[in-house]
Image: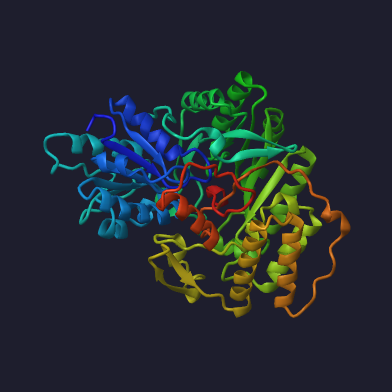
C-alpha cells in the first residue's frame, strides 16, 4: 500500500479551514514511508479516478456536519470502489461507531487517531490482513474505546490541498487576510454535558509539542497566512504551554495576528495572561457563553454563571480585545423570557456585531453518546434517535419556543443569503421573539445601525449544532455532487465550529 494513490484521506468539512484532521495523519504516514493522497470535498470535486485507485480510504469526521457529508460520500465511494477499506476516524466516528460499522465503514477510530490509523494501514499492507490491530480500531463485532494515549507527533503536511485563499479568511479593517489553522492541544479538561468531546475524552487533554506547532505555523506563513486560528477546544487548558507557543510565534513572526477559544472560567482565572497575549497579536477570543440563564448553565454543567460572563465582558473592554461570545439559545430549559433577555443584553452590551447572526437560531444538539442522554434534567424532553441526522430529537415544554426556533432559523438563513445587514437580522430576530410573547418590540437605538468593524473569520460554523437546510444543501452539493473547485469564503452564513464546546 506504499504506492502513491493507494491510500486516500478525505475531508468533507472542517470549519472552513484547511483540514488539519487530514494534514496531521498525512504527516504521520509520510514519516513512516507512505505517500497518501488527499481530497477535500468541501472545496474540490468528487474525483472518481482517485477514489477508484485507492485500496484504503480514511474519511475524517471531526464534527457533526462532516459526518453527515461523510456517510453520503461513503455511499458513493462504495459504488465506485466496492473493495476498498473505508475507515471513519475522528470525534464523531467514536460517537457513531456502531451505526457506521453496520452501514458504511470497515473500521472506525476515535480519540488520538493518528497512531491507530497508521497501525491499521501497516497491517492492511502486510501479508496477514486477518490479524488486524485491536488497540484504538473498531471493527464489526469488535468495539474498541477511543485511543487516549500521548502521541509522538509529526508536523502536519498540507501538500495536495487547495491554497489558503480557498478557505476562511480574517476580515478586519475592511480587508481580508489569509488565515491558517493549528492546534496546540486536543481534548479538554472539562466535562460540559452538551459537548461532544466529553464522552470521547472524558476530561483528558493532550499537548501538541511546541516545535510541531511552530513548524506548522511556519508552513502556513510560507503559504501566505498572516493570521493564525488556534483551534484548541480550550487554549487555556494548558496556559503555560499556550503562552510559550505564542511567545515563540511572536518572536519569529512579530506581525502575525491570532485568535483562540477558551472557557469563561479559564479567561477569568488566567486574566493576568491576557495583556501579554494581546500585545503578541491576539485580535479576538471566542468563548462559549451558551446562555445567560443560570438554570440552563447548571443543566449544561458549564462551570460559569451569568455574573461571570458580565465580569468577563468588562475585562475584555478594559483590555481592548474583541470577545466573541457563542450561544446555544434554544435548549429544553430556556424560557421565552430567557431568550428575550439574551437579546436585550446583547443590545445593551453592544455585542450585536460581535455575534454571528446564526447564533440566535442554534438549537441544542444531542448526538449519540452525549452525556446529556443520562442527565435527569434532559430525560423528560428527550425523543428517539434520528439516525439520518445523527442526533436525538427533543421537544421544548413550551411549544412557542420550538416554533420560534423554526422562524428564527428561517429568517436568519434567508436574510443572510440576501446579504442583509447584521443589524437588520438582529432587529428581525428581536421582533420575532417579542411577537412570540404577544408583544411588539420597542424600536432599537439609532446608534446600533452603525456597522462596527469587529475582527472575525469569514466563515463560522458550530459543531454543537446542526447545519441549516440551506447550508447543508450547499455543502452537500459541493461535496457529493462534484462541483468544480471554488472558494468557500462566506460572510457569517454557517453554523458549526467546535469552539462552542
**Taking 324 as reference, is 1 left or right?**
left
**Taking 353 as reference, is 213 left or right?**
left
Q: Is the residue 71 above or below the residue 229 in the image?
A: below
Q: Determine the residue located farthest toward the front in the rendered image.
A: 484
Q: Residue at x 52, y 75 (%)?
A: 395
Q: Relative to the observer, which residue lies in front, 161 or 59?
A: 161
**Taking 41 as reference, is 333 left or right?**
right
**Taking 203 as reference, is 437 left or right?**
right
Regarding residue 173, the answer to whether it shows in the image is yes
The color scheme shown is rainbow
Q: How many marks?
A: 0
Quarter of the image where one finds residue 239: top right
Q: Residue at x 72, y 32 (%)?
A: 275
Q: Determine the residue located farthest toward the right in the rendered image.
A: 446
| Residue 12, x across and y down, in percent | 43, 47
Name the quadrant of the N terminus. Answer: top left
| Residue 64, x across and y down, in percent | 45, 55
Q: Is the residue 112 above or below the residue 462 in the image?
A: above
Q: Relative to the observer, which residue lies in front, 213 or 271?
A: 213
Q: Relative to the observer, which residue lies in front, 470 or 363?
A: 470
Q: Residue at x 74, y 73 (%)?
A: 434
Quarter of the image where one finds residue 22: top left
Q: Is the residue 15 above or below the residue 342 in the image?
A: above
| Residue 80, x across and y down, in percent | 27, 49
Q: Determine the residue located farthest toward the top in the rendered image.
A: 252
Q: Relative to the observer, which residue lies in front, 276 or 96?
A: 96
Regarding residue 197, the answer to whether it shows in the image is no
| Residue 98, x across and y down, in percent | 29, 59
Q: Is the residue 387 above or below the residue 285 in the image?
A: below
Amino acid at each position: 500500500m506504499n504506492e502513491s494513490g493507494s491510500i486516500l484521506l478525505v475531508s468533507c468539512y472542517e470549519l472552513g479551514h484547511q483540514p488539519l484532521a487530514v494534514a496531521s495523519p498525512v504527516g504521520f504516514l509520510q514519516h513512516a514511508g507512505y505517500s497518501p493522497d488527499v481530497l477535500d470535498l468541501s472545496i474540490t470535486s468528487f474525483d472518481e479516478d482517485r477514489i477508484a485507485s485507492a485500496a484504503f480510504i480514511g474519511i475524517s469526521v471531526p464534527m457533526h456536519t462532516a459526518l453527515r457529508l461523510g456517510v453520503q460520500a461513503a455511499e458513493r465511494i462504495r459504488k465506485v470502489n466496492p473493495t476498498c477499506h473505508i475507515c471513519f476516524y475522528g470525534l464523531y466516528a467514536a460517537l457513531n461507531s456502531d451505526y457506521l460499522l453496520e452501514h458504511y465503514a470497515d473500521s472506525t477510530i476515535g480519540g488520538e487517531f493518528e497512531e491507530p490509523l497508521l497501525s491499521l494501514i501497516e497491517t492492511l499492507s502486510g501479508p496477514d490482513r486477518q490479524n488486524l490491530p485491536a488497540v484504538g480500531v473498531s471493527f464489526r463485532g469488535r468495539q474498541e474505546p477511543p485511543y487516549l494515549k500521548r502521541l509522538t507527533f509529526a508536523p502536519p503536511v498540507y501538500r495536495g490541498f487547495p491554497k489558503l485563499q480557498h478557505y476562511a479568511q480574517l476580515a478586519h479593517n475592511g480587508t481580508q487576510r489569509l488565515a491558517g489553522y493549528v492546534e496546540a492541544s486536543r481534548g479538554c479538561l472539562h466535562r460540559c454535558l452538551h459537548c461532544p468531546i466529553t464522552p470521547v475524552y472524558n476530561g483528558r487533554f493532550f499537548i501538541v509539542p511546541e516545535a510541531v506547532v511552530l513548524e506548522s505555523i511556519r508552513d502556513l506563513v510560507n503559504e501566505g497566512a498572516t493570521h493564525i486560528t488556534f483551534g484548541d477546544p480550550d487554549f487555556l487548558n494548558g496556559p503555560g504551554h499556550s503562552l510559550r507557543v505564542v511567545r515563540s510565534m511572536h518572536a519569529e513572526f512579530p506581525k502575525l495576528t491570532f485568535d483562540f477559544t477558551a472557557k469563561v472560567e479559564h479567561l477569568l482565572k488566567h486574566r493576568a495572561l491576557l495583556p501579554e497575549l494581546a500585545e503578541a497579536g491576539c485580535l479576538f477570543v471566542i468563548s462559549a457563553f451558551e446562555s445567560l440563564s443560570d438554570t440552563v448553565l447548571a443543566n449544561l454543567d458549564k462551570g460559569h454563571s451569568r455574573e461571570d460572563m458580565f465580569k468577563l465582558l468588562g475585562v475584555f473592554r478594559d483590555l481592548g480585545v474583541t470577545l466573541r461570545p457563542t450561544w446555544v439559545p434554544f435548549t429544553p430549559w430556556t424560557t421565552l423570557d430567557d431568550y428575550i433577555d439574551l437579546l436585550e443584553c446583547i443590545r445593551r452590551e453592544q455585542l450585536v456585531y460581535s455575534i454571528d447572526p446564526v447564533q440566535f437560531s442554534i438549537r441544542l444538539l444531542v448526538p449519540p453518546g452525549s452525556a446529556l442522554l443520562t442527565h435527569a434534567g434532559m430525560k423528560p424532553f428527550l425523543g428517539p434517535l434520528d439516525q439520518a441526522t445523527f442526533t436525538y430529537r427533543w421537544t421544548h415544554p413550551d411549544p412557542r419556543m420550538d416554533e420560534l426556533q423554526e422562524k428564527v432559523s428561517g429568517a436568519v438563513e434567508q436574510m443572510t443569503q440576501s446579504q442583509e445587514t447584521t443589524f437588520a437580522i438582529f432587529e428581525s430576530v428581536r421582533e420575532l421573539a417579542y411577537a412570540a410573547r404577544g408583544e411588539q418590540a420597542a424600536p432599537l437605538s439609532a446608534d446600533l445601525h452603525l456597522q462596527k468593524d469587529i475582527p472575525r473569520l469569514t466563515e463560522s460554523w458550530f459543531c454543537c449544532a446542526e447545519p441549516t437546510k440551506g447550508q447543508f444543501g450547499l455543502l452537500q452539493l459541493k461535496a457529493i455532487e462534484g462541483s468544480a473547485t471554488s472558494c468557500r469564503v462566506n460572510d457569517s452564513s454557517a453554523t458549526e465550529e467546535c469552539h462552542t464546546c
